[in-house]
Image (tube, rainbow, N blue to C red):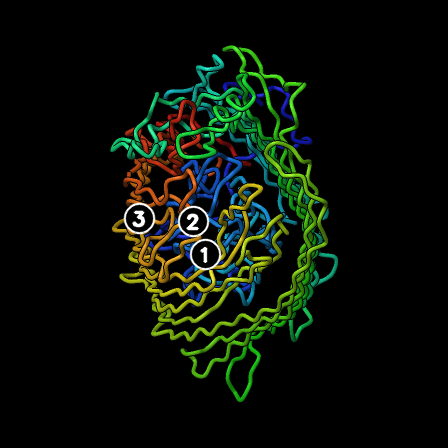
Amino acid sequence: MRSGMISKGLLLGGVALGALSVAGSARAADDKGTISEIIVTANKQAERLHDVAQAVSAVTGTDMATRNQTDFHDFAAEVPGFQVEETSPVYNREILRGQNSGGAGATVATVIDEMPLSFSGSDNNGSLVSTNLDTYDLQRIEVLKGPQGTLYGATAEGGVVKYVTTPPNVNSYQAGLEASGYNVGHGESSGSVKGYANLPLIEGKAGLRLTGYEEGIAGYIDNPLQNAKNINSGEKTGGRASLLLVPIDGLTVRLTASQQLIHTDGPNQVEAVGATLFPAQPAPPDQLALANGYVDNSYYKQTQDSRLSYYYANIDYDLGWGNLTSISSYGTLKASYVTDDSNINAAPGLSYGAYLSGAFGTPLGLRLNERESLSKESQEIRLASAPGEKLFGNDLDWIVGVFGTREYVGFNQVFDFTNIPAPGQAASTLSGFPPAGGQSEPSRYEEWALFGQVDYHFLPDFDVAAGVRTSGDQESLHATFDGGVLVAPSPAQGPIVSNEHSTTWSVAPRWHLSDDTLLYGRVATGYRPGGPNLIIPNQPAGYPTDYGSDSTINYEIGGKSYFLNKSVDVDVALYDIQWSHIQIVTVINTSTGPYTVVGNVGSAASRGLEWSLGWTPLKGLRFADAGAFTDAHLTESAPLLGGMKGDQLSYVPRWSNNLDADYEWQLFDDFKGFAGMSWTFAGSRYADFAPAGTPSESHNKLPSYSQINLQAGVRNDHYTLELFARNVADEKGISSYSNMGGYNETGQMTLIQPRTIGLRVAATY
């Protein structure tokens, strides 16, 4: 479906289309005006969110639907300490508690239900190729903050984002329909159609849930160079089928298959004034200003595509004395883009287009086609104790498990020279020129792990949970090169192999002062695996032939409490994270040109305070505030990164906050009116580091910004009509920035989506 229209050919396999997730709100008021509970599985077992001895945020499907939050760009503000560095719906970086050095490897792991689906290694752009799952028909999203290495393994050194889909219901039919239309300021209109159907195939024994969605992505950026408007428009489509079987008492089998496709005709970047860094021309004071409005000139259509597919089987058997669970999964995540590299600077003030045109005596453009892919197969088997198990007369909960995964990662780059097309004309590859070059770097990552956690209740109201995980991994890297002007001729390489063993652990004491008040402490560790680097010609002294894992240790204390008959709720956490042997991406200059490699440098610390506060003063009226203070900085200078001791880590605001106010009242018959607003604040941040001697300016300070969202409508148990507005003040908040790369020596930056006004209608049955 193209932006600006709803596809009439949408077919969801006969699904009756649906509206709202069946989950209740984690922090919504019940009929008595008090807080309703939510159950989470952060520790791989069901427990009240209020009882979890660590900082976990849960955003429910109901809340996300009401606030029109369709992906993590939208719901991140609801989670203290969570930021998303955005360039497009396809390429984003998730950051938890300030852990970001701009490296290639992700520091936040993604889990869908019980299936891990994110890059483990750092030899690809796994930190940017994110699992941005649509939020429709989700029960909730759980965000686990701080290292989670004991239960979730590699890459979870910063935290985990866990998508929990709505399971089939084996006892009742459920279905519905949702449609929306909206307009984006400075751009076009679009809309969406989403739905689900739940079918009890055999009452009490088998149920099937089908979910589908199709959404247009409205563009708002123009390309005058090509006479093109709304070049960042696109579409997102997806579907999920889940079958739940209960053949005998105590045995459940859930089989799920899903796919999501995202396509855009261009990134969300616009031209900024920038700073070309001529030696005689210092950076202008207005380098963060829009150069030409919502414009991104390029010679080519810079398409971006993402394909997410996954399949898993979750088998759970109640043995009476314990619970045996097996999760078998296979998932793929593929991303690709075309970009105009003509304006990337080869040296300060000198773009590749200008350099190549001068070298060959004719105007030339430079186009890059890049593809990244992940194929991941995993198996986890775990055994957990049954409720009520005793040791020395006190309660004992335990879990033990084994885990294995194999990942196949693809990375391909192809450069080509083109003519400079006339406005409105397509560029074409030029013949008669030497090739520009390209390379392919496939790799394989394998990991095994043993893990366990024991929770012993020394007193009825005091217990201590302790866990450990030991793992080993092996990564092998191959490379082939298509030599050319930009890529030095080189023989094929591989396999280049690295091996590691890692141990992570956690300890979490918990004290229930009462049923409504919990105090806890937590010390936990996490890691990101190391790997090999390519062998490069004329390796300089000190070149890292491989890189080791980096690791975090988190010291945390927190409290959760309800007051005044649960009309007030408080969730506060204070933490100190030490980050060692940080993995970074840097540039090594050799006699045959610059090479990008991964290495380890220095250390960093992240210390902060996170809070979630709620107040329900009367039935139907709810105030909620979620925010964080984050002091994330380098504790050692890292010249290869371009950072000095004390520098703030990239894209991490010291202060961030989100305030919600919602009111619901009786309107007529069984219909209720509702209205709500959200105010989001992101404090000043710094852009990525850049090593000395490169054309990029390092660590630009980005200004703070605020965003106001509104929604209002009427609803009952079956129907909803809602008006919504996002970014009401049309704030130009900067999500990412580079001082170069734009047409005519401008910079590039991504802004939050302009003012968006829309209408949503929904029906459930």
594 or 681, which lies in front? 594
For mark 2, does the 10 Å Cα neighbourhood hold few (<14), some (14 to 19), or many (20 or more) residues? Answer: many
Quadrant containing the N terminus is top right
Disc 1 versus disc 2: distance between alpha carbons?
A: 7 Å
Disc 2 versus disc 3: distance between alpha carbons?
A: 23 Å
How many circles with numbers are drawn on the protein? 3
Question: In the image, what residue type sits under mark 2?
Answer: Ser
Quick check: 689 above or below 53? Answer: above
Q: In this rendering, would 28 be left or right of 364?
A: left
Q: Name the secondary structure under disc 2.
A: loop
178 or 91, which lies in front? 91
Q: Residue at x 55, y 35 (%)?
A: 18
Please give the residue where the numbered disc 1 appears in the rendered image: 38
Q: Name the secondary structure under disc 3.
A: strand
Q: Which mark is residue 242?
A: none
Nearer the N terminus, badge 3 or badge 1? 1
Quadrant containing the C terminus is top right
- Foreground: disc 3 or disc 1: 3
Please give the residue where the numbered disc 3 appears in the rendered image: 656
Looking at the rendering, which quadrant does residue 578 occupy? bottom left
Please give the residue where the numbered disc 2 appears in the rendered image: 25
- Foreground: disc 2 or disc 3: 3
